[in-house]
Image (cartoon, rainbow, N blue to C red):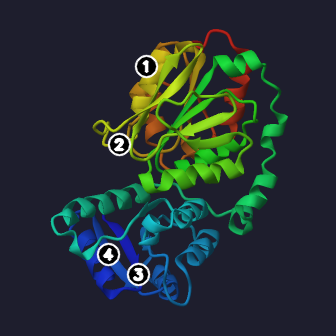
Amino acid sequence: MTIKVLVCDDSPLMRAMLSEVINQAPDMKVVGTAMDPIQARDRIKELNPDVLTLDVEMPRMSGLEFLERLMRLRPMPVVMISTLTQEGSETTLRALELGAVEFLAKPKIELGKGLEAYAHEICEKIRTARHARVRRLSPVIAHSSSIEKRQQVSSAAHLSGLPPRLQQEHLIAIGASTGGTEAIREVLSALPAHSPPIVIVQHMPEMFTGSFAKRLDNLCHISVKEAEDGERVRPGVAYLAPGHSHLSIRRSGGGWVCELSKSEPVNRHRPAVDVLFHSVAKEAGAQALGVILTGMGKDGALGMLAMRQAGAWTVAQDQDSCVVYGMPREADAIGAAVDVAPLKDIASRVWHRLLAGGDRRSA
């Protein structure tokens, strides 16, 4: 079935370029364009597109303001395509928080031969968005600032204390892709400050991972930072793979250290979840807990299977709570997941498993 796309951008040249790129794909078609959000609102009602591409800086209403209204009143898959998605990472993260499925920097006119690769990326993101599960924006997210939301993070309060020995002996590994920024936020914000060390791979370009880590650090009880090569992981801290490198862990003494590598992409990704999970399986074994969250594709499934086979307890996000049920589905299909749970329950399941201890091979 052909994917119907509406392009919203105030630049006539950009509207024409995006339309040409999208119309060349055999499975999608631009059914209309809009020069601003007001026009886009009318075109959405008239044309009922499957996916909207949306700029940020536009006349009469900003893209973020329109996105917020759209996701409150008529939720639909949105791909942000703007210069600000590259230059203003905070703007991009806010767009994802408001419900945008994907984001992409605008193509440069002088791309030349590089436009073919860019066209492929645009079309892949539109395909992903088409299959995404979008939800109506909650008033809390729509109207609260990051500082206000940190004050609202209280779900970690009910989790009982973890003995220092368990904080030191265990490691939590998390992997995610499309929809993962908000899924990771929900999991981390529900964990108390006295958590074991956490290592994370989120598929994200390098210009965004630093801002994403800072944003999470402001919203969570634990500390969150970009991982650095050779640094020792510590309880109460989450380490996010920088967008330019694979993240793995290596045992050192009684704990672990982070290792970064700019080796070739795995499953078309760098950082790749599989790289992290395979290293955790090898270096942490039954002392690890693995979490795979929403995302397109299969990255992380084989790594999580290796973790389970090494004795780790593992959990996959369930279909109903995923934005894109790809990576968790693949993990569950090959028997990599010990447990499958709604996003809202994952932090508590991890915590109760930490407290229970025992044989992590059991279901």
Crowd around label 2: few <14 · some 14–19 · many ≥20 (10 Å)? some
Amino acid under disc 1 = Ala
Tag 4 near tag 3, CB within 8 Å: no
Amino acid under disc 2 = His
Q: Looking at this view, is 65 or 27 the one in front? A: 65
Element type where label 2 sits in the image: loop
Q: Looking at this view, is 363 or 275 the one in front? A: 275
Q: Nearer the viewer, mark 1 or mark 4?
A: 1
The residue that mark 3 highlights is 9
Residue 95 location, quadrant: bottom right
**In the image, which disc is placed on residue 170?**
none
Spatial separation of the CA atoms under disc 4 and disc 2:
28 Å
The residue that mark 1 highlights is 306
First reached walking from the N terminus: tag 4 or tag 2: 4
**In the image, which disc is placed on residue 269?**
2
Which residue is at a point 21% across and 66% down the rendered structure image? 115
Element type where label 3 sits in the image: loop
Q: Which of marks 1 and 2 is in front?
A: 2
Spatial separation of the CA atoms under disc 3 and disc 2:
29 Å
Rendered position, 96 above or below 230: below
Q: Which residue lies furthest to the top in this view?
A: 359
Q: Looking at this view, is 69 or 271 the one in front? A: 271
The residue that mark 4 highlights is 30
First reached walking from the N terminus: tag 1 or tag 4: 4
First reached walking from the N terminus: tag 4 or tag 3: 3
Crowd around label 3: few <14 · some 14–19 · many ≥20 (10 Å)? many
Element type where label 1 sits in the image: helix
Which residue is at a point 41% across and 81% down the rendered structure image? 9
Spatial separation of the CA atoms under disc 3 and disc 1:
45 Å
Left or right of 311 on screen, residue 158: right
Rendered position, 56 above or below 347: below
